[in-house]
Amino acid sequence: MSGEWVTPEDDYDCQLSEETQKMAKDELREDKNTRDQALEQLRSWLKLNPRVENSRMDARFLLRFLRCKKFNVPMAQEAIERYLLLRQVYQPAFHNLDVNEKNMEELLALGYIFAVPGRDPKGRRVIVARPGVFDPYKYTNADMCKIHGLTYEALMEDEESQVRGFVHFADGAGVSFPHLTLFTPKEAVRIVKNGEVSSTAKVAYFAVAQYADTTRLLFFFFFFFFFDCSTVISTFSRLSQRTLPMRHKEVHAINVHPSLKFALDFGMSLISEKIRSRVTIYTSLDDAKEKGMDCSMLPKEYGGTIPMKEMIDAWREELMSLRMTLLSHDKMRVRPELYSEKAREGAVSALKQGFNCSTVSTGESTMHGICGSFRKLEVD
């Protein structure tokens, strides 16, 4: 890499609350010594890796990946490189994540997806999704990818959220069979299989990557509540499952249309009992309340105290404050010609073969890795 990095190296000053620091230590094995050594290893690896041309080098960005991998450096390397590769290969969907872009403004105003202000009692951000307001005849799959990318990239800038994770709430009102016809059965199965990971195989979401069962939780959320699974959205699903370093703790869904029950049953049959326990589906908002779902963090329209419009406006302000940071991600780049075609398509097997801590030949290029200790990862 020549020239300046997107962001320079910095001296990390931990701003996590004492409670969150204890959680990070207990759940992620994070302490000052481990953190400092891992950051040094990642930065050295990025400088030596011939396939990476530019990246952020600040601690907050790199810690996203280290935390989701519980400070297993080789796995964090895989996740970073996969993230950089797939962002670049599918630029129409993942570049120019600009809240001021017309379609992004419209989808945000509709309340398609947004994070509510504050945190739940466990310190997690709550993400509200209303897929029924997405007009598949007006907006494209790339628009869908962008609004999700915009949301999650912004949320991952917050270190408390990197540690504590997220809760999802989806309202299926307005989603019906026409949404379902936007993907083929072949694409559906492909996404499911890419999302399936054995929790006993050292989290193999992924070619020894992300959150195992937690990955399938995000997959379930995307696939069965956002439906648009053409080539672009399936790639976004793989990216989010296998690369976006997020901890997804719960999914709650209401108003699921009866015509989609077969799709839900199909999806639930393909995920583990552990992940199924994190997904709760209700027939209606009243049903959710009767069964004890906490509505206090939701918009007033769903039983909370703050009107949805105020929440959306507050979220827009958050996005605006991060606008330049998110746009700067377009400067991050790898050399796609040094990856196999299957790797560029996001194929799990290809990425597994191409990303490991030993030296791997790829034509005339070499993959440089740092040989760290492989720890057995536990599902969050």
Image (cartoon, rainbow, N blue to C red):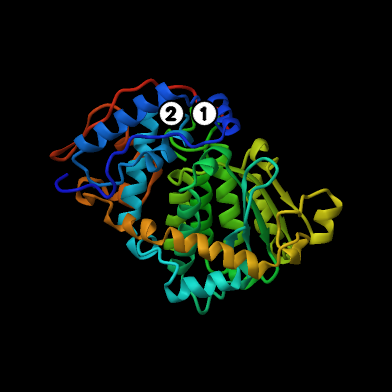
Residue 73: give x, y in percent of width and height: 37, 29
Residue 112 can be seen in this image: no
Say which residue label 1 marks.
Answer: 28
Front-lying residue, 45 or 298: 298
Identified at 31% across, 33% down, the residue is 42
Name the element at disc 1.
Answer: helix
Toward which corner of the image does residue 289 lie, by quadrant? bottom right
Q: Decide: marks 1, 2 in contact (CB < 8 A)?
A: yes
| In this rendering, position of residue 270 left or right of residue 374 | right
Q: Residues within 10 Å of mark 2 (few under 14, many from 20)?
A: many
**Alpha-carbon distance for marks 1 and 2?**
7 Å
Q: Position of residue 277 (x, y in %)?
A: 70, 40
Give the crowd class for mark 1: few <14, some 14-19, many >=20 residues within 10 Å.
many
Left or right of 295 on screen, residue 13:
left
Amino acid type, label 1 = Leu
Q: Amino acid at mark 2?
A: Phe
Q: Position of residue 147 (x, y in %)?
A: 48, 64
Could you tell me residue 265's position as x and y percent?
69, 52
The residue under label 2 is 71
Where's the N terminus, which quadrant?
top left
The total number of labels drawn is 2
Q: Is residue 90 left or right of residue 141?
A: left
Please tell me which residue is depicted at 52% across the width and 75% down the height of the picture.
106
- Residue 32 versus residue 319 in the image, above or below: above
Residues 102 and 132: in front is 102
Task: Name the residue: 13% across, 39% down.
Answer: 364
